[in-house]
Image (cartoon, rainbow, N blue to C red):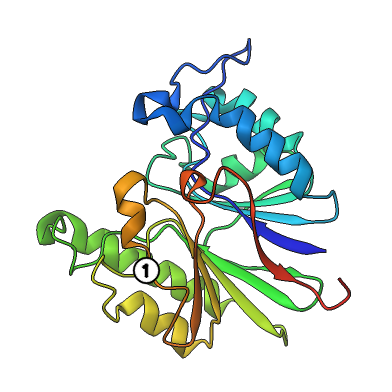
C-alpha cells in the first residue's frame, strides 16, 4: 500500500459529464484536465492505495452540485481522503458531507485517520499567514486562529502509538517568504515529518516551500504543479 496526494482537482461535471466551469480559462495546461487526471491516476494508483486530496475538489456550491464530481472520484482506483479547500463551498456540515460520500471517500476535519496501524493522517484547510501581503487583520485573523485550532484538534485526537504523521493542508503553512509560522510550530511540536498542501497555481507555484525545512518534508500537490498526476508521498515497509 502506498499513499499518494493530489489537490485542486477543480471538478465541475454536470449530468452529461460536461464541465460547466472548464478550467482552460486559466491556461492551456488546464485543457481537458479532468481527463489528464483520470489517465494518470489509473496508471499510477492501485485499489490498495490511498490518495490524499487536500482541498478544492469541486466548484459546486452545495452537495447536490457535486454528485457527478463525487462519482468521478469514486470510480478512480484507491481510497481517497479529502479535506476542505477555500473553493469547496459545498462543504458546510461535516455530518452531511460524510453522509453523502461514497464508501471509498473519507472526509477529514478536526480528527485523524490511521492507515495500516503506522501512519496518522491529520489536517485542516489552513489560511493566509499574517506575513502574507494580502492578509487583512479585520477579516483574516479570526479565520487563521480558527484553522490553527483545528490543526491542533486533529493532531491531539491521535491516541494510537503510530510511526509517522502526515498533515494535509490546503493553504501553504507559511507565507511566500517561508518564515517560521504558527502552523509550522504546531507541526514541529507534534513531531510531524510530512506536510502536503496545494492552493498555489501558475506563477505562485514558484513560491512553494523547499522540499525539506525545519525537519519537515513539504510537498506541493496542486494538480497543475505536479502534472495532474498523483504524487507518491509514502510507501509502507511491506511495499
Q: Residue 43: image x %, image y %? A: 77, 43
Q: Residue furthest front?
A: 28
Looking at the picture, tell me which residue is in the foreground, 200 or 211: 211
Q: Residue 113: image x %, image y %? A: 68, 66
| Residue where numbered disc 1 is placed | 173
Q: Residue 206: image x %, image y %? A: 33, 58
**Which residue occupies 37% across, 63% down?**
208
Q: For residue 112, which quarter of the picture?
A: bottom right
**Which residue occupies 45% across, 76% down?**
152
Quadrant holding the N terminus: bottom right
Q: Residue 101: image x %, image y %? A: 67, 39
Looking at the picture, tell me which residue is in the foreground, 150 or 3: 3
One can see residue 103 in this view:
no
**Which residue occupies 29% across, 78% down?**
181
Q: Residue furthest top?
A: 16
Describe the element under mark 1 as helix, strand or loop.
loop
Quadrant holding the C terminus: bottom right
One can see residue 173 in this view:
yes
Horizontally, is 101 left or right of 42 in the view? left
Amino acid at each position: 500500500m502506498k499513499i499518494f496526494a493530489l489537490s485542486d482537482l477543480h471538478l465541475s461535471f454536470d449530468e452529461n459529464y460536461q464541465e460547466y466551469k472548464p478550467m482552460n480559462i486559466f491556461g492551456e495546461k488546464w485543457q481537458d484536465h479532468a481527463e489528464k487526471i483520470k489517465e494518470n491516476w489509473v496508471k499510477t494508483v492501485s485499489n490498495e492505495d490511498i490518495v490524499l486530496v487536500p482541498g478544492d475538489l469541486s466548484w459546486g456550491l452545495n452537495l447536490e452540485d457535486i454528485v457527478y464530481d463525487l462519482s468521478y472520484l469514486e470510480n478512480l482506483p484507491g481510497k481517497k481522503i479529502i479535506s476542505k479547500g477555500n473553493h469547496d463551498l459545498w462543504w458546510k456540515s461535516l455530518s452531511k458531507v460524510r453522509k453523502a460520500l461514497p464508501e471509498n471517500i473519507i472526509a477529514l476535519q478536526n480528527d485523524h485517520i490511521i492507515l495500516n496501524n503506522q501512519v496518522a493522517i491529520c489536517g485542516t484547510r489552513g489560511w493566509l499567514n499574517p506575513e502574507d501581503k494580502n492578509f487583512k487583520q479585520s477579516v483574516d485573523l479570526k479565520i487563521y486562529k480558527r484553522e490553527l485550532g483545528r490543526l491542533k484538534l486533529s493532531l491531539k485526537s491521535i491516541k494510537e502509538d503510530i510511526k509517522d504523521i502526515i498533515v494535509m493542508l490546503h493553504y501553504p503553512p507559511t507565507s511566500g517568504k517561508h518564515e517560521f509560522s504558527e502552523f509550522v510550530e504546531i507541526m514541529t511540536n507534534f513531531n510531524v515529518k510530512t506536510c502536503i498542501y496545494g492552493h498555489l497555481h501558475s506563477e505562485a507555484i514558484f513560491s512553494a516551500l523547499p522540499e525539506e525545512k525545519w525537519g519537515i518534508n513539504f510537498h506541493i500537490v496542486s494538480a497543475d504543479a505536479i502534472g495532474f498526476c498523483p504524487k507518491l508521498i509514502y510507501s509502507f515497509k511491506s511495499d
